[in-house]
Amino acid sequence: MIEFKGVTKKFGNVKALDNITVTYPEGKIIGLLGPNGSGKSTTLKMIASLNKPDTGEVLINGKNPSIETRKQIAYLPEIDYLYSWMTVRDANNFMKGFYDDWNEDKNLKLMKFLQLEPNMIIKKISKGMRAKVKLLLAFSRDAKIVLLDEPLSGIDILTREQIIETIISDYSAGEQTIIISTHEIQEIEGLVDDVVFLKNGNVILQGDAESLRNERTMSLVELMKGVYQHGDF
Ligand SMILES: Nc1ncnc2c1ncn2[C@@H]1O[C@H](COP(=O)(O)OP(=O)(O)OP(=O)(O)O)[C@@H](O)[C@H]1O
């Protein structure tokens, strides 16, 4: 379970997170939704221990984010963080060196499924292929928590489908927690168990996706439109 307790994070005058209290339940696929600048990346970086709250507290199974908690977290950042000179094999070896939970069998299986070759050079492959390499690295580990920051952004429809299949292929409900940030809910509507809607650094709605759909008799896509365009649910 990941808990945010009264968390505020400011960058200059901008409140990226504004006194947020929210719980991300364990063992579920959670959609972290919100328009540009709503605080999604800041949230994920905080869980990954890449930034710290100014006030308040983040707890991952009762512990503050640290190098220790990082060992159980696979984090796929929004930015292109891979060195351009690397091959896919180099990228694999790079990650393998950092994490004890690297799973070679999973890596080989995913490489095949994603049609990635060890000799492919990062700078020579397409944006979609680079997105697949980032996903490969995140899912080649047996991490308890997987954080995916906009994994589908700018990716064509066929590659998106492959990425979504990858996310669900090895997922065992109850054992792994996956948080996926996006501003395009329609891409992941069928995938998520829970949702957290952010706006201007605040949580404006959260809950079990199925219950929200039933209570409000509308899809998450329609719900999101209401939340962001009209400011109501
Ligand atoms: N390192 C930083 N320096 C200055 N401002 C920042 C920094 N990181 C985030 N911000 C600001 O904090 C706010 C929240 O940013 P964040 O990246 O968390 O939003 P987001 O929901 O992930 O947006 P996007 O969908 O565009 O990635 C924005 O106004 C952003 O400009």
Image (cartoon, rainbow, N blue to C red):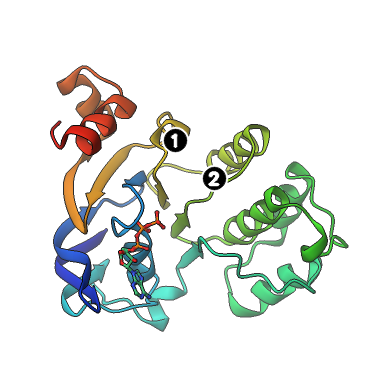
Judged left or right of residue 125, residue 176 is: left
Quadrant containing the C terminus in the rendered view = top left
The 10 Å Cα crowd at callout 1, few under 14, some 14 to 19, many 20 or more, is some
Q: Amino acid at mark 2?
A: Leu
Q: Residue 130's x, y, as percent? A: 69, 56
Circle 1: element type: loop
Residue drawn at the location 21% of the way across and 29% of the way down? 212
The single residue placed furthest to the right in the displayed view is 119
> Residue 43: where, in percent of width, then height?
31, 63
The quarter holding residue 194 reads top left
Residue located at (22% from left, 75% from top): 10
Q: Badge 2: few (under 14), some or many (20 or more) residues near its Cα, within 10 Å? A: many
Instruction: Locate residue 80, reporting x and y percent.
Output: 61, 65
Which residue is found at the position 51% from the left and 63% from the top? 77
Residue at x 74%, y 73% (from the top left corner): 93
Ligand 1 rendered quadrant: bottom left
Instruction: Compare marks 2 and 1 and give the one earlier in the sequence.
Output: 2
Residue 175 located left or right of residue 22: right
Q: Which quadrant: the N terminus?
A: bottom left
The image's mark for residue 37 is: none
Kindly tell me whether residue 182 is visible in this rendering: yes
Quarter of the view holding residue 162: top right
- Image height of 87 relative to 210, above or below: below
Give residue 166's position: percent from left, percent from top: 60, 42
- Mark 1: C-beta under 8 Å from nearest atom of ligand 1: no
Report if the CB atoms under discs 2 and 1 are less than 8 Å apart. Answer: yes
Which amino acid, mark 1? Ile
Marking on residue 152: 2
The disc at residue 188 is: 1
Camera-side residue: 171 or 135? Answer: 135
Q: CA distance from mark 2 to mark 1?
A: 9 Å
